[in-house]
Structures are given as structure tokens and as C-alpha cells.
Image: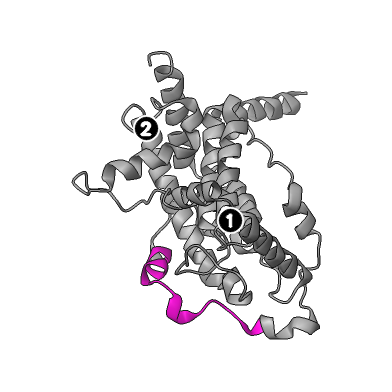
């Protein structure tokens, strides 16, 4: 009996001294839905009838030097052993696959039906997205860069911003650094050609100087949606709806396959899961939660 009491006491001690961030599990990842599910159920294996497509990768001459240098930056919260798991979470279907063909047809359909209003909205969203390396307050992009950190949380109100929530802002900046590094390292690993490299009928509204997989816009938008959900759980649906609009915009522009966007959503959730392995992230998230609870009453 004495040994049992000792074991129970030890278990209670371990639970009580564990970082509080681990005591509350993450929200579960919502199941794949809509056409992302439909296309994902198609074969992603090479189709011999379109074998020529599998010889195409992202053209080296179109690669931006910034896309390469951003992949060389160190992560803040993401540990190397967790980062090593990311490429295995999802991978693009073969260029010649039935899945890719269906996704290209989907993009052609969007191209044929997109309205001026939809184009304007997608082009507006294309300019959203914060960067970790705009740190000088005299930089002309400094204020806008910080404002955009809270884009996914616009439904909370314009008072939820970098000026009123400094701890949350620092958390977001650290996360953005990890997100951007992850984005460009994955693009380097897979070097997936953009849809317009495979389908000559596609007329993209812009061209991007980095590979297609996974979508950077979808990665930061869903990661932020999941992160804000840990701070303000009751707004999760609104945050995800905002992120979903971001990924839709990338398809409307003709620059991302649906599988780029769905992969980014899955990777985003796992980023948050892996960050929870870092005590510093847990501490910083606690500060952001406490800041929200304290300041929301005063604003």
C-alpha cells in the first residue's frame, strides 16, 4: 500500500508541475470537407497516359532569391526533430495523376466564372501577410505589417491590434517566423510546379516566384486561425472562415491547386501541435491568453 501511495503522490506531483499549456489539449483538426475531400479521394499516383507532365518541376529561373534565403532563417519555437516530421505529413499528387487533372479542371472552371468583385477581393487578400523581418519602426511597412498580424482576427474588432496587445503581437511575430521558414523549406523540398506550368489554358492573375506546395497564404492564415482559437476559443468558427477565404483566393487567382491549400491547413494544425513541445511557446501563449482576459474587459 505504501508503494501505491508513493506512486499516486508522484503522479499528482508530475501533473501539478507540468506546464499548463499541456494540460489543455488542442482543438481537434476539423475534417477535410467539400471538394478538398472529393479531389483527395482521387488517385494521386502517376498516370502513364500523361507521363510527360511528371518531368515538369518549378523552373529554377523563376525562383526568387528571397524564397531561398527565407528558408535559411532559424525557427523560434519549432524544434528540429519536429520540423523533420513536416514533409511526411502531406505530399503533392503526381503531376500526371487523376487528382491533379481534376484540380486543374477546377481552376479552369473558376477562371471561366470569376467575377470582377471576386477578382478584386482575391487581389486584395494577395497583399495580406506579415513578415518577421520588418522590425524597424521607421520602415514604411512597419505599421501595416503589424496590423496584418491580426487580419484573421478581424471579427473580434479593430481594438484587437498590435498596439493594445503587445504580448500577443510578439507571439505572432515569433510564429510568423516559423511559418515563413516552414513555408519556404517545404517549397524547396517538393519544388512543385505551379498550375499554370502544367495547364497552358490557365491565365493566372499573377505569377509567383516560388514553388506551389504548400500554399504560404493558406499556411499562415490557418496557423493564425488555430492559434487565435487557443486564445479566444469562442471565435474559432469565424477565424477558420476567414482563413478559408484566403485559401479560396489562391485558387481563384489560378496560382494554387486545392491540394496545396488542404496540405497547408493540415500542416498548420501540426505546427501548433509541435510548438506545444516548446516550453517557451507555452509560456508566451499563456501571456497572450492572460493579456486577452485582462484587456478585453477594459476596451
In front of the other: 251 or 217: 251
Query: In x, y percent, where is residue 210?
Result: 47, 69
Determine the residue positioned at 47% across, 41% down. 281
Q: Quadrant of the C terminus?
A: top left
Contact, mark 1 vs mark 2 (Cβ under 8 Å): no
Identify the element where label 2 is drawn. helix
Residue 108 appears in the picture as rendered: yes
Count of marks overlaid on the render: 2
- Residue 60 is one of the magenta-drawn residues: yes
Determine the residue positioned at 73% across, 77% down. 96
- Residue density around tag 2, few if under 14, some if 14–19, many if 20 or more, within 10 Å: many
Identify the element where label 1 is drawn. helix
**Is 149 above or below relative to 187?**
above
- Residue that sits furthest to the left in the current view: 138
Could you give the CA–CA distance between mark 1 and mark 2, rounded to whole angstroms? 35 Å
In front of the other: 128 or 87: 128
Check disc 1 and report the residue beneath it.
Answer: 252
Query: In x, y percent, where is residue 194?
Result: 57, 70
Residue 272 appears in the picture as rendered: no
Q: Which numbered marker is on residue 160?
A: none
- Residue density around tag 1, few if under 14, some if 14–19, many if 20 or more, within 10 Å: many
Determine the residue positioned at 74% across, 52% down. 35
- Residue 221 is one of the magenta-drawn residues: no
Check disc 2 and report the residue beneath it.
Answer: 167
Query: In x, y percent, where is residue 297?
Result: 43, 13
Query: In x, y percent, where is residue 229?
Result: 56, 33
Q: Main secondary structure of the magenta part?
A: helix
**Is 139 above or below relative to 70?**
above
Res. 251 image quadrant? bottom right
Amino acid at each position: 500500500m505504501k508503494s501505491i501511495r508513493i506512486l499516486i503522490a508522484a503522479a499528482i506531483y508530475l501533473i501539478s508541475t507540468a506546464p499548463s499549456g499541456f494540460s489543455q489539449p488542442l482543438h481537434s483538426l476539423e475534417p477535410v470537407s467539400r471538394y478538398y475531400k472529393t479531389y483527395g479521394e482521387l488517385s494521386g499516383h502517376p498516370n502513364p497516359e500523361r507521363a510527360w507532365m511528371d518531368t515538369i518541376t518549378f523552373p529554377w529561373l523563376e525562383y526568387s532569391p528571397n524564397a531561398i534565403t527565407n528558408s535559411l532563417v532559424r525557427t523560434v519555437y519549432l524544434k528540429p526533430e519536429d520540423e523533420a516530421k513536416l514533409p511526411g505529413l502531406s505530399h503533392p499528387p503526381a503531376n500526371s495523376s487523376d487528382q491533379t487533372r481534376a484540380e486543374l479542371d477546377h481552376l479552369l472552371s473558376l477562371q471561366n466564372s470569376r467575377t470582377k468583385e471576386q477578382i478584386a477581393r482575391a487581389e486584395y487578400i494577395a497583399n495580406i501577410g506579415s513578415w518577421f523581418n520588418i522590425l524597424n519602426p521607421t520602415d514604411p511597412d512597419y505599421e501595416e505589417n503589424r496590423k496584418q498580424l491580426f487580419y484573421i482576427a478581424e471579427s473580434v474588432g479593430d481594438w484587437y491590434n498590435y498596439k493594445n496587445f503587445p504580448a500577443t503581437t510578439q507571439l505572432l511575430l515569433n510564429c510568423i517566423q516559423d511559418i515563413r521558414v516552414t513555408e519556404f523549406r517545404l517549397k524547396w523540398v517538393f519544388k512543385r510546379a505551379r498550375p499554370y506550368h502544367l495547364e497552358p489554358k490557365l491565365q493566372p492573375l499573377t505569377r509567383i516566384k516560388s514553388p506551389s506546395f504548400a500554399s504560404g497564404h493558406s499556411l499562415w492564415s490557418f496557423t493564425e486561425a488555430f492559434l487565435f482559437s487557443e486564445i479566444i476559443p469562442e471565435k474559432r468558427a469565424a477565424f477558420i472562415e476567414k482563413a478559408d477565404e484566403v485559401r479560396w483566393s489562391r485558387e481563384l487567382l489560378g496560382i494554387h491547386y486545392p491540394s496545396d491549400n488542404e496540405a497547408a491547413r493540415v500542416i498548420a494544425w501540426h505546427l501548433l501541435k509541435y510548438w506545444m513541445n516548446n516550453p517557451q511557446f507555452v509560456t508566451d501563449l499563456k501571456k497572450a491568453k492572460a493579456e486577452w482576459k485582462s484587456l478585453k474587459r477594459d476596451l
